[in-house]
Image: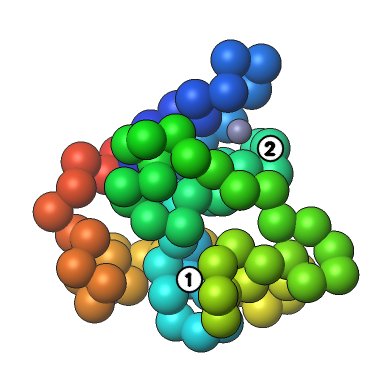
Amino acid sequence: MWLDECPSFWDEGRVRPLVTQSGKVVLRCDSCAAVWPTLSDFKEMEHVEPDEPDWVVAAGVHVRPGTFRWASAQDLEVAGMSGLSWRS
Ligand SMILES: [Zn+2]
């Protein structure tokens, strides 16, 4: 499931929803390192690039390898994000 193509002009990845360890759903490119903490951040093209050792996205939210999974339709419903134009 993906929302849009990665806005980075050099990248052809897709922006996908991801469930972090804390349960918060964020948007992450499946190709480059870009993460958008919220939908608003994506719309404003305000991305972060989490990196070791903390992999911090925002306060209390991280994408440390092995601690997250790509979101399902049910995850999006729980997060109140099911109304967006998701593509599959
Ligand atoms: Zn990308």
Query: Which residue type carries mark 2?
Result: Cys
Q: Residue at x 19, y 59 (%)?
A: 82
Q: Tell me the crowding category of disc 1: few under 14, some 14 to 19, or many 20 or more residues within 10 angstroms, Cα based.
A: many
Query: In the shown orientation, is residue 53 left or right of residue 2?
Result: right
Identify the image quadrant of residue 47. top right
Q: Residue at x 55, y 67 (%)?
A: 58
Q: Are marks 2 and 1 in contact (CB under 8 Å)?
A: no
Q: Circle 2 sits on which residue?
A: 32
Q: Residue furthest bottom?
A: 22
Query: In the shown orientation, is residue 87 left or right of residue 29?
Result: left
Q: Earlier in the sequence, mark 2 or mark 1?
A: 1
For ligand 1, the image quadrant comes to top right
Query: In the shown orientation, is residue 7 left or right of residue 53?
Result: left
Image height check: is 73 above or below 5? below
Residue 19, labelled with which disc? 1
Instruction: Give the distance between the C-alpha atoms of the residues marked 2 and 1, in whole angstroms.
Output: 17 Å
Local secondary structure at mark 2? loop
Asked if disc 2 is less than 8 Å from ligand 1, the answer is: yes
Query: Which residue type carries mark 1?
Result: Val
Front residue of 15/22: it is 22
